[in-house]
Amino acid sequence: MNVLIIGASRGLGLEFVRQYRAAGARVTATVRDDAGRARLTALGAKPLTLDVASAASVSGLAWQIDGEAFDVVVINAGVFGPRAGALEAPTQDDFDTVMRTNVLGPMRLLPQVAEALAPGARLAIVSSRMGSIGLRTGTHGWLYRASKAAVNSVMKDAALALAGRATVISFHPGWVRTDMGGAEADIDAPTSIAGMRTVLASVKPADTGSFFNYDGQPLAW
């Protein structure tokens, strides 16, 4: 199996690399700095340096993966931003940072990876249940929520564009004990990633455009 993980410096992305390498997969993964490259090299993965918030950096990805045929692609890079609730207006800088990373990043990345997909590939965007409108009961982190609702829309359009070539889905990884999730979160990274890997191994073309919990439960938009 040939796997690409985008956003693997730490947390969930790094755990994806660890588990796929343990399963014997060939893994290419992106990081932002030399420390991240060292972590990937230690796991036997091929490191690429990429900043998803930089147009110039993302535009250089296609040639670095030219000739590849990835069976699985996971777009994991993201930021939370301010934790303010509804009616607390974000600053322009916060808005630009969160939306550029969480929404524009995948919109730039998807065309870059589309030509490097193996027939029948599975492509996942790590989103969040916080992006669901139907399941929403709180407003905490409303800028992050808006960005994840938007990236779910991006995923759905990619699923339509890649129909017949790849199965494209979004994930809620669970509330995970990472730097973003915090120490009080429900599950650890190995549990989250093991669940998402199981889902990725089992989804069918008919599932394309779907939004799943890490354990395979379908989620409302």
Image (tube, rainbow, N blue to C red):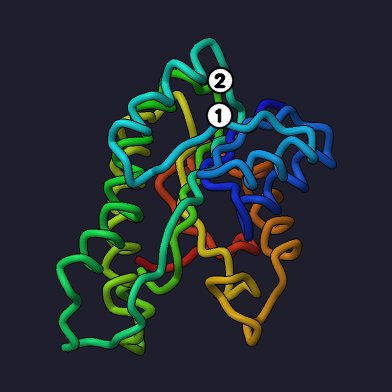
- Could you say which disc has been placed on residue 118 in the image? 2
The crowd level at tag 2 (other Cα within 10 Å; few <14, some 14-19, many 20+) is some
Do the residues under discs 1 and 2 have CB atoms within 8 angstroms? yes
Q: Secondary structure at mark 2?
A: strand
| Nearer to us in this view, 212 or 206 | 212
Q: Amino acid at mark 2?
A: Ala
Residue that numbered label 1 is attached to: 121
Percent across and percent down for residue 193 are 68, 57
Percent across and percent down for residue 75 are 48, 45
Q: Is residue 182 above or below residue 154?
A: below
Relative to residue 105, is residue 212 drawn left or right? Answer: right
Distance in Å between CA atoms under marks 1 and 2 = 5 Å
Percent across and percent down for residue 123 are 51, 38
For the point 45% across and 41% down, the residue is: 168
Q: Is residue 53 above or below residue 119?
A: below
For the point 30% across and 31% down, the residue is: 56
Q: Residue furthest front?
A: 34
Relative to residue 9, is residue 40 drawn left or right? Answer: right
| Nearer to us in this view, 18 or 168 | 18
For the point 42% across and 21% down, the residue is: 62
Q: Quadrant of the N terminus?
A: top right
The crowd level at tag 1 (other Cα within 10 Å; few <14, some 14-19, many 20+) is many
